[in-house]
Amino acid sequence: THERVIKVRALPDAPPTYVPQNEDIDEAQLFTQTSLMVYFDSPSDTGGDSIDKWKVEWDITPNFNGDNYGYHEEANHGYAQEKYNITGLTMGQLYYLRVTAHHSGGYGTPSVSYPAKPMQSSDAPYDVTLSTLGTEFSPDEIGSKLLLEFG
């Protein structure tokens, strides 16, 4: 009599892949009256895989569930610092921004929300003149100060 022995072999489970954690918005700068440029870094913990894209989100509510919610998915360019220009915003409106990294394990935890407000930059002065003070000022002021005028 012959006995048959069947040995079962299987591949080990794949190592767990964790989603990226702790991305950080460095800053959001005024770009125009209706846009903000968001600068952000790779997360401190990528979960063992390379980041392949980013999701940049914005809203007027800090919990990102308002009527003005918007987002954009951007491919990872591998720069030391990534950036995205959010357009179509309302000047003077406070927005909350956040960034989430993505890799083969999915999206990670969003960054802490970052408040920012698109504003109009001030106009440059025009008709600038620089002169000495007139005789209506004291001798000490005339010798130590200048008069700057602009329109």
Image: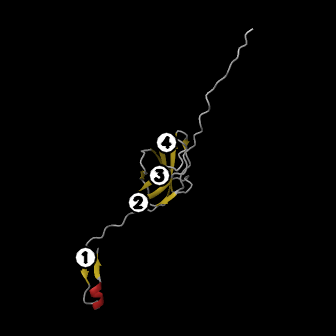
Mark 3 or mark 2, which is nearer to you? 3
Identified at 41% across, 60% down, the residue is 30
Which residue occupies the foreground of this view, 116 or 50?
Answer: 50
Q: Amino acid at mark 3?
A: Asp
Question: Given contact means CB atoms under 8 Å apart, are the residues at marks 4 and 1 in contact?
Answer: no
Q: Position of residue 125 (x, y in %)?
A: 30, 70
In the image, is 9 to the left or to the right of 38? right
Q: Which numbered marker is on residue 50?
A: 4
Find disc 1 in the rendering and name its residue.
129
Considering the numbered disc 3 on the image, is that residue within a helix, a strand or a loop?
Answer: strand
Task: Name the residue type under label 4.
Answer: Ser
- In-image side of 37 versus 59 (left or right): left
Sequence-wise first label, 3 or 2? 2
Q: Which residue is mark 3?
A: 41
Q: Amino acid at mark 1?
A: Thr
Residue occupied by mark 2: 30
Tell me if residue 40 comes above or below residue 117 in the rendering: above
Q: Residue at x 47, y 43 (%)?
A: 53
Helix, strand or loop under label 4: loop
Is residue 68 shown to the viewer in this render? no
Residue at figure coordinates x 54%, y 42% from the top left: 48
Q: Position of residue 23 (x, y in %)?
A: 51, 51
* Mark 1 vs mark 3, CA separation in Å: 45 Å
